[in-house]
Image (cartoon, helix red, strand yellow):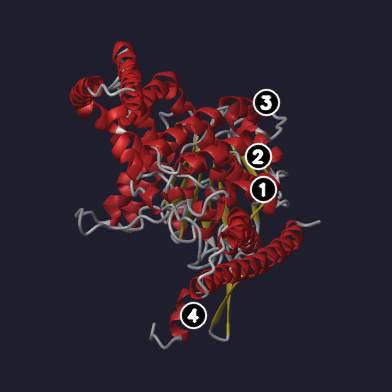
Amino acid sequence: MTPAAEYQTRLADRQATAALHDGRHITLGNVRLLIAIAAAAAAWMSLVNHAFNPAWIFAPIAVFLPLIPIHGRVLRQRTLARRAILFYERGLARIEDRWSDWGEQGVRFQDPNHPYSGDLDIFGPTSLFQLLSQARTRGGEDTLAHWLQHPANADVIRRRQHSVNELRGYLDLRETLFTLGEDARDTVHSGHLIHWAESPLILDSRRLRLSAALLSAGMAGAVLTVLYTDFNGALAIMLSIVGAFGYWLRNRVLAVITRVDEAVQELGLLEATLAAIEKHPFESPHLVDLRQRLTASEPIAKLHRLAELIDSRDNPILRAFGPPLLYGTHLAFAVERWRARHGPSVRGWLDAVSEMEALLSLAGYAAEHPEDPFPEIVEEHIFEGHQMGHPLLPGCVRNSIRLDEAASLICISGSNMSGKSTFLRTTGINVVLAMAGAPVRAKRLRLCPLQVGAAIRVTDSLQGGTSRFYAELKRLRQIVDLTAKPFPVLFLLDELLSGTNSHDRRIGAEGIVRELLRRHTLGLITTHDLALTAIAKDNAHFEDTLVDGQLHFEFTLRPGVVQKSNALELMRSIGLNV
């Protein structure tokens, strides 16, 4: 069964489930309303007839109360079914390339100084991140964004590939994690939780904790003394002592309670996420290791209960009786005990959750595009792509290319709109996918770990007082500096030095390219200036034809330098006298 067919089948099933629970919700609502009306009518009749019978009221109540939790479960199941509907509708939209209007775009990760993310549409509207990300927490988004911004080494890439290949088959797990929360990104603040967990303890004295326990026991004894004797002095003494103790610790207790309230928002969602991952069987060593690092649902559940007990202090009864019994103080000590025991582990838990979410995002993409293979990661200095396509351009023409030590530079010529820039982006974005551990849009791809450096979409800056030419020079300097890093550089340069005269462009471009190649890089450059094609030993081009005043493009990469130009004919076709 194809992914689209499976999604359609499951979508229909979840829609039927939602409709079923919606019907049950309406029925239960009507039944509860009728019972309430019947109870009110019985009470009214008993008052009118002066013949009150408690059974007339308590019998409907006895029927009404059990319906409340039943109705709650029905509403919960309806909510989960509706979220599952959304999960499969979005999956079908991705498969059918209708995904650009929804999803997290990753705008907060955009960085104009990054060596390729802006040039290759990694973040922002209709970006690679928007297509890939299915993360439910900000930590998961952060991890996925980091993978797309920084290449991994060969061992890490292969480990991720193995994990993604296994996870792509776990559709139930991906659906479960998606349906756990409406929008987890806005509620699971991992940064706040980590900062809180790792900050110094405020109440870490065992003697103070023991003193609080003894005072609460003494207060309980004083209350019993008042109830069973006529002596009130013990209660007055204990109230004074407890009041003084509570006032002395008040600021520290409030600090603990306030900070935990800020840090542990929506712990129920995190607890459910951890539980779903913990109980799932995995096979690949890396996923097994992640699951072992994620055995945290029980302590997170305990922290969740503590947070709920802290919220319960607003109950009127606890407002009255809690302070004399040091209720808030004991909760503060319990929170600090939790931090002392589990605080150092929180960062590891959340990092593991974030990594799992990033892997699941790549697994979702892999499952929905089964024709996209994992690239072969090799040690030799090579980039060999067969029938590469652009994952953000459905139905684009696919092309092949090979770069290695013998042919480390290819210069691509052709007219505007013929496909030169798109091919650079196609090459670059597939390298980004490969370095993240994801499948690639190609028939086959062999490459070594590569660091991409691109100068494709370089623009001027009015605020920064930078011309396009100077901005391009800064990017070229950045690409040269990348060669000092561990991975070989793949440079992608579009219309190199087009902002200067032909004489300086020819000398400058040749000098820059030779310097890059001297540093054992691989590269593609595009140009309109055919004089620059002499820089490279290997050339390729895109062709176009002008028919009846209309340009027609093949978008097929051909060997050699382009032999014709249609610029003058196109100018004349629109009425320019040239």
- Kindly tell me whether residue 379 is visible in this rendering: no
In whole angstroms, how far apart are the C-alphas of marks 3 and 1? 20 Å
Query: What's the amino acid at mark 1?
Result: Ala
Q: Which residue reaches farthest front?
A: 50
Q: Which residue reaches farthest right?
A: 1
Q: Residue 163 placed where, x, y %?
A: 66, 35
Q: Which residue is mark 3?
A: 285
In whole angstroms, how far apart are the C-alphas of marks 3 and 2? 12 Å
Q: Secondary structure at mark 4?
A: helix
Is 198 in front, or is 324? Answer: 324
Query: What's the amino acid at mark 4?
Result: Glu
**Proximity of marks 3 and 2: CB atoms separated by less than 8 Å:** no
* Residue at image point 60% right, 36% down: 275
Answer with left or right where residue 14 lies relative to residue 272: right
Q: Quadrant of residue 216?
A: top left
**Label tally:** 4
Mark 3 or mark 4: which comes first in sequence?
3
Q: Residue 545 placed where, x, y %?
A: 59, 75
Query: What's the amino acid at mark 2?
Result: Val
Work out whether 540 lies above or below 194. Answer: below
- Say few, some or many: other residues with alpha carbon within 10 Å of mark 3 (under 14 / 14 to 19 / 20 or more): few
- Say few, some or many: other residues with alpha carbon within 10 Å of mark 1 (under 14 / 14 to 19 / 20 or more): many
Mark 1 or mark 2: which comes first in sequence?
2
Q: Which residue is mark 2?
A: 164
Mark 3 or mark 2: which comes first in sequence?
2
Mark 2 or mark 4: which comes first in sequence?
2
Q: Which residue is mark 1?
A: 366
